[in-house]
Image: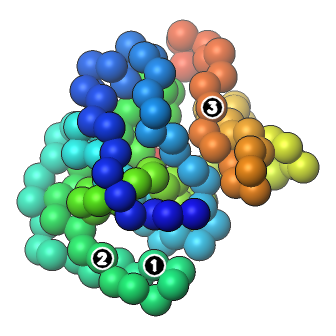
Amino acid sequence: MNLLGNSDTPSVFDRLIGKPTSCSWIFDTGATVHATGTLGFLVDQFDVVVCPLTLPDGSVIYSTRRGSVVLLASLILRNVLYVPNLSCNLISISQLLVEQCDILFTHNLCFVEDRSARTVIGAGEWRGGLYYFCELPVDSTASPLAI
């Protein structure tokens, strides 16, 4: 899988209203931080001191901004690094666990659960050897979990 390349730039509004985009979010057990190559996903963004990230092949890329990403009304990723030219979006399993979520993997699905409320707030489906984030119907009375 080629992690570097050009990606489309959907607006934050497109993501908030659930408009499909060609950019997918991948659950990554090896990532230590959430990361995106699409600056348009970030809300409340700000500059950061240049932050090196090491890819699985040993190459180093650099993050220049940080912000939040709204995946669902009930699931907001905090401290997402913007990495120019990163062609996929990574959801860090370790960061989810630190932020009080539990993750359950099955042979074709994964579920993100709010540890304190014991409710499913996100899910992923197995495609081509990876778990891709997918939307679930969520109770509109549930409060958003920022992770």
Q: Answer yes or no: do the residues labelled 1 and 2 have beta carbons within 8 Å?
A: yes
Considering only vertical position in the picture, is 28 above or below 120? below
Q: CA distance from mark 2 to mark 3?
A: 27 Å
Point out the residue furthest to the right here: 107
Give the image quarter of residue 137.
top right
Q: Residue at x 23, y 68 (%)?
A: 63
Considering only vertical position in the picture, is 124 above or below 49? above
Q: Position of residue 90 (x, y in %)?
A: 48, 55
The N terminus: image quadrant: bottom right
Residue 134's label in the rendered image is 3
Q: Horizontal placement of 10 versus 135: left or right?
A: left
Question: Closest to the observer: 135 or 147?
Answer: 135
What crowding class fits label 2: few (fewer than 14 Cα within 10 Å), some (14-19), or many (20 or more)? some
Q: CA distance from mark 1 to mark 2?
A: 7 Å
Name the N-terminal-most of marks 3 and 1. 1
Badge 3 marks a residue whose secondary structure is strand
Name the N-terminal-most of marks 2 and 3. 2
Residue wearing tag 2: 61
Q: Position of residue 125 (x, y in %)?
A: 74, 39
Q: Position of residue 122 (x, y in %)?
A: 62, 34
Q: Residue at x 30, y 29 (%)?
A: 10
Q: Position of residue 39 (x, y in %)?
A: 22, 45
